[in-house]
Structure formats: C-alpha cells, structure tokens
Image (cartoon, rainbow, N blue to C red):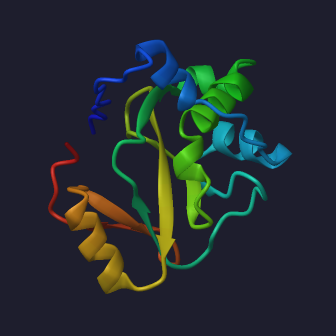
Amino acid sequence: MKDAKGHGSNPRGTHASLVDKIANVQLHPSVIRKLAASDGSVKPRTGNSPSTGYMVSIPGHTQVVSAGALKGPQAGDIIADYANTHASALASPEAHIGRWQEPGTDKVYLDVSHNIKSRDQAVKLGRKHNQIAIWDLKHGREINTGGTGE
C-alpha cells in the first residue's frame, strides 16, 4: 500500500500547513500497549477494540513503520506521532487506529479505519478506496475487495 501525501499551495507557507495537521490526540493508555503488541484496531480515546463488523481503511492515512521499532521503547512516540499527524481523521467518532503487519516482513501498516457493520457496505467502501481486502472481525479473516492498495 502506498500513501501519497498531497501538498498544495498554501498562502501561509508549507511549514504552516504541516503544523496545522498536527494536534495533541489524547490516547487511552492501552492503545500503545495493544498496537505495539499485535495487529488490530483500537479507538484512540477509549482503547476499545471492536469484535464485530468489518474494518475498512480510510485513504490517505497509512504510515509504514518497523515492527521492531514498535516492540522497543520508542513505540509510544511512534504511535502518538501517528495519532497527532492524523488527528483530523481520528476525530471522527467511527475512527480507529489500525495496525497490520505484512506477513514475513518487518513492515507494519498503521492506518485510520472505520468499523462498518454491513458486509455489503464495507465491501463497497473497500472497493471505492481501492483496498486489496477488508477485515472481518467476527470470523478473523480478510475479504478480498479486488483493489491494488495503491
């Protein structure tokens, strides 16, 4: 998956536009522990993880990090920096911070995802977002949506 960060013109300058995207998201103490340890999705402010529905990634909010780094002392900083950088997307009541490690690699994908209750709606949204797959929480499996992840 690639995450293209579009930078447009800003009359106040590039630095100001980047600063505007960073906020101070209050993370529940269990968020860092959960995301450092294993794949899943958590609500930033409560630390709760959904157990039903389908997780669909929101485009433009993917960041690749090292699995090794998430197991180390810098895990808290990595996750807090990610949350602060994507604060506007995480402000949505449906938003979760998701973590998925690519099998056989050190690559971990952090993203903003929404929990969609309807399988049909989740598949349609996954296709619209060009996702390779969405995650079925109840059955613990991917559902192919035919996208490229680009």
Residue 63: image location, x then y, percent: 44, 32
At x 36%, y 23%, the residue is 10
State the residue lying farthest toward the right.
29
- The one nearer the camera, 22 or 34, is 22
- Does residue 87 appear in the picture of this structure? yes
State the residue lying farthest toward the front.
11
- The one nearer the camera, 83 or 11, is 11
At x 55%, y 29%, the residue is 20
Q: Report the number of discs.
A: 0
Q: Quadrant of residue 143?
A: bottom left
Residue 58: image location, x then y, percent: 39, 54
At x 58%, y 51%, the residue is 90
Taking the image as shown, residue 118 lies to the left or right of residue 43, namely left
Q: Quadrant of residue 86?
A: top right
Taking the image as shown, residue 74 lies to the left or right of residue 59, namely right
- Does residue 39 appear in the picture of this structure? no
Taking the image as shown, residue 17 lies to the left or right of residue 74, namely left
Q: Quadrant of residue 134?
A: bottom left
Placement of the N terminus among the 4 image quadrants: top left
Residue 131: image location, x then y, percent: 25, 56
Residue 57: image location, x then y, percent: 40, 56
Placement of the C terminus among the 4 image quadrants: top left
Taking 87 as reference, is 134 above or below it? below
Taking 43 as reference, is 76 above or below it? above
At x 60%, y 20%, the residue is 69
Taking the image as shown, residue 50 lies to the left or right of residue 144, namely right
- The one nearer the camera, 22 or 64, is 22
